[in-house]
Amino acid sequence: MIKSFHVKIAFAHLVTIILWASAFPGIRAALTAYSPEHISLLRLLVGSLMLILAAFIKRIRLPEIKDIPIILLLGFLGFSVYQTALNYGEQTVSAGIASLLVSTTPIFAALLALLFSREKFGLWGWIGSFISFCGVAFIAFGDSAGSFSFNAGIILILIASLSESIYFVFQNAYLKKYGFFAFTIYTIWAGTLFMLIFMPGLGEAIMNAPMDATLAVVYLGIFPTVIPYFTLAYVTSKTGASEATSSLYLTPVFAFLIAWFWLNEIPHFLAIAGGMITLSGVFMSNIKREDELQVSQTPLKNYKSTKREPELNSSKQV
């Protein structure tokens, strides 16, 4: 049972990383014909329509009225702000560089979780994060041109990363209440609602855009918009925000590879070296200390005295 549970978490991590990595070159492809705000709107509309069918099949219940304000806020930050800021940023930042900037999300998330949720990331987690961030720096200097210039696009992408981190950290209590499936649907719909202010001109943009650009947005709406949020919410509900987002350091590695094949953005040698450093940092950040392993094997009756949530509960279906 435990082995099967860990396999599910590992698979959820892998799906999250690959699909999220593909979003960065997908955005660059869509920007050839669509404005940043129209990409976000169309992407969320496509995702929301897909989720209406899913919600009907799963018969998810409506959220409680008292939770609607926080759902709207998290949907605004996690989808409206994140996607729009990222789109604007990628107008001047390549797909690979954008992905490495967004990989600062685990750092923001760990700090927020420490401040507000009192989650302990652990010594190995912080060491691994530092090593991974060094790898991110190598990737930054490993742009296709071999250079890395600071511009407004970088600031916008960092804002996107911060808003996404807030979404990940503060969703945890509501994941427990509604389940990762229902809550993710609520927040995607909330994010779509805020983006409707950009509806004027969308129809004309679709009519004038080439088919490949429109298909890129549709792909973004079906895959990176919906599925990774489900898988990451699932992992967060099982492991906590800081550990769940630690694997996102791998995203730049896959983003560079996908952008290489899709957009012919050829990574520099430093980008490859940075990818290897990042991988080693991710490995270290997930090393479990001996005392943590011993606690996980403690009988259920002793968990009350240690004030730790039993890991046995993590195998329950949400």
Image (spheres, helix red, strand yellow):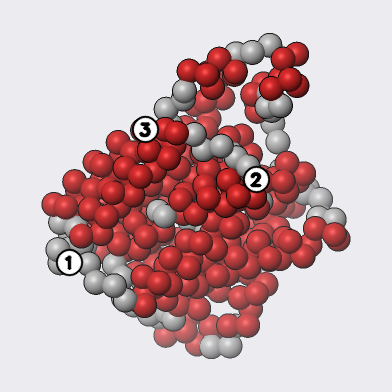
Q: Residues within 10 Å of mark 3 (few under 14, many from 20)?
A: some
> For numbered disc 2, what is the local secondary structure?
helix
Mark 1, residue position: 147
In what quadrant of the picture does the C terminus appear?
Answer: top right
Using the rendered view, name the quadrant where residue 179 is placed: top right
Disc 1 from disc 2: Cα separation:
38 Å
Above/below status of 184 relative to 308 = below
| Residue at the spot 34% in from the left edge and 56% down from the top edge | 100
180 and 222: which is toward the camera? 180
Q: Percent x, y for residue 151?
A: 31, 76
Using the rendered view, name the quadrant where residue 36 is placed: bottom left
Residue 50 visible, this angle? no
What amino acid type is highlighted by mark number 1? Ser
What amino acid type is highlighted by mark number 2? Ser
Using the rendered view, name the quadrant where residue 157 is placed: bottom left
Q: Percent x, y for residue 219?
A: 45, 61
Above/below status of 88 relative to 215 = below
302 and 228: which is toward the camera? 302
Marks 1,2: beta carbons within 8 A: no
| N-terminal-most mark, 1 or 2 | 2
Mark 2, residue position: 117
134 and 15: which is toward the camera? 134
What amino acid type is highlighted by mark number 3? Met
Mark 3, residue position: 284
| Residue at the spot 46% in from the left edge and 50% down from the top edge | 107
| Residue at the spot 77% in from the left edge and 65% down from the top edge | 69
| N-terminal-most mark, 2 or 3 | 2
